[in-house]
Amino acid sequence: MKVALIFGITGQDGSYLARLLLKKRYVVHGVKRRSSSLNTKRIDDIYVEPFSKNQNFILHYGDITDALSTTNLINKIKPDEIYNLAAQSHVAVSFDVPEYTANADGLGPLRILETIRNSKKKIKFYQAGTSEMFGKVDQIPQNEKTNFHPRSPYATAKLYAHWITKNYRDAYGLFACNGLLFNHESPMRGETFVTKKIVKALVRIKNKKQKKLFLGNIYSKRDWGHAKDYVEAMWLILQQKFPDDFVISSDKQYSIKQFINIVSKKLNLKIKWIGKGINEKGINSEGKIIIECKRKYFRPLEVDNLLGNSKKARKILKWKPKYNIHTLVEEMIAHELEMIHE
Ligand code: NAP
Ligand code: GDD
């Protein structure tokens, strides 16, 4: 049986990756942080203390900013594969906590790489890189050869992680790989990311549980896929003969406003748009304002135009996403409808 260690097990991707690896009969170890309130809701159904329902699923306390805990865990578990998904992953928040973001997202992977380098065991390493590194893009669509131009403390920290992973691969022969993943969503997405925020709010507005949705820039464009498809790509990247870096994307692009229109159509919520810029508003069929823009949700710098070209992954990994924007949105809506009655 293969042994995997996942940093960031309690996050969206960690919860999908853990399920995928358990299905593939891995022993899965996950690292969770201590928090003042429970942070394991995405994985509670596959883990019950003290006797885990699933004996192959083991959780450990740790923190990627703590070199001792990171190194000790790797040396104790001696996994075959490490997936580093742990990060302060919110771009807007990274402007408020830049030093912490640099430490967790930039130096965190270095701590893992250095431990792998000093380990006798050959451990494969996956680093959760991001399309945010392309930032102010000079090429559309973006692929593995596109220049990087990060536009946030988050993207800048991730760029360090990207290069240090590549450097450890080149310098020390580590099986260390970067995934350059474009935005991926799911019912498990964090509440403050835009797709989840929109779907949740529009479902609640439709059901008269909420009056308004406040957003920032609705003209940026993103390439959205489903987390379930994207964690499969992470696994495939580590199953190749040689370590390499791959763009993972749907290769389709929508603006935030288009995303709102897709969700509202599926909910049969007729939205009319009026006004411009910060004064643009969405109005329902009764003439009530249900969507407004607020300055506080705009970022000091924006990434306007992300669109991936995942040709390399589709050819070499033979990766093919099962979801599209419509099936993704439908699954997210169905989940929010279930939650509304909880
Ligand atoms: P997420 O839901 O925010 O999950 C992040 C995970 O990292 C959580 O388990 C979090 O723990 C953990 N974490 C944060 N700081 C930590 C620390 N100091 N020590 C240990 N664990 C820590 O993010 P996601 O959407 O699953 O994304 C997974 C990874 O892929 C992240 O690195 C993200 O930057 C990257 N990525 C995401 C996307 C995307 O569209 N989702 C695209 C490209 C790259 P808590 O639960 O305790 O907060
Ligand atoms: N979060 C949020 N909240 N974003 C908003 C809002 C709002 O109220 N209004 C407009 N937006 C815009 C943002 O300005 C951005 O242009 C876009 O919606 C997407 O924002 P997020 O959903 O927060 O995602 P992101 O693209 O910034 O970052 C996500 O994807 C990256 C991959 O490209 C995160 O998952 C990152 O961790 C990931 O690396």
Image: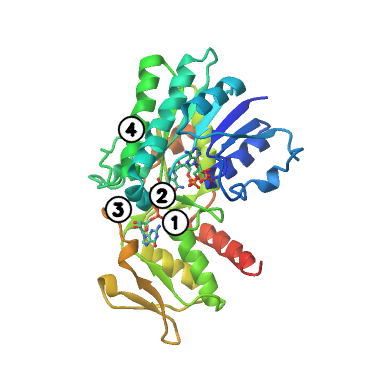
* Label 3 lies in ligand 2 vicinity (Cβ under 8 Å): no
Q: Position of residue 307 (x, y in %)?
A: 34, 49
Q: Which residue type carries mark 4?
A: Tyr
Residue 72 vertical placement versus 264 (above, below): above
Check if mark 3's residue and mark 2's residue have beta carbons within 8 Å.
no
- Classify 301 as above or below 114: below
Real-space CA distance between mark 3 and mark 2, rounded to the nearest whole angstrom? 18 Å
Q: CA distance from mark 1 to mark 2?
A: 8 Å
* Residue occupying the far front of the picture: 36
Q: Is residue 162 left or right of residue 149?
A: right
Q: Residue at x 46, y 59 (%)?
A: 195
Mark 2 and mark 4: span between their CA atoms?
Answer: 17 Å
Going from N to C along the chain, the mark reached first, 1 or 2, is: 2
Q: Is mark 4 within 8 Å of ligand 1?
A: no
- Mark 1 touching mark 3, by CB under 8 A? no
Q: Secondary structure at mark 1?
A: loop
Of the image marks 1 and 4, the number of the one nearer the N terminus? 4
| Mark 2 CB within 8 Å of ligand 2 | yes
Tag 2 residue: 90
Pointer 4 residue: 160
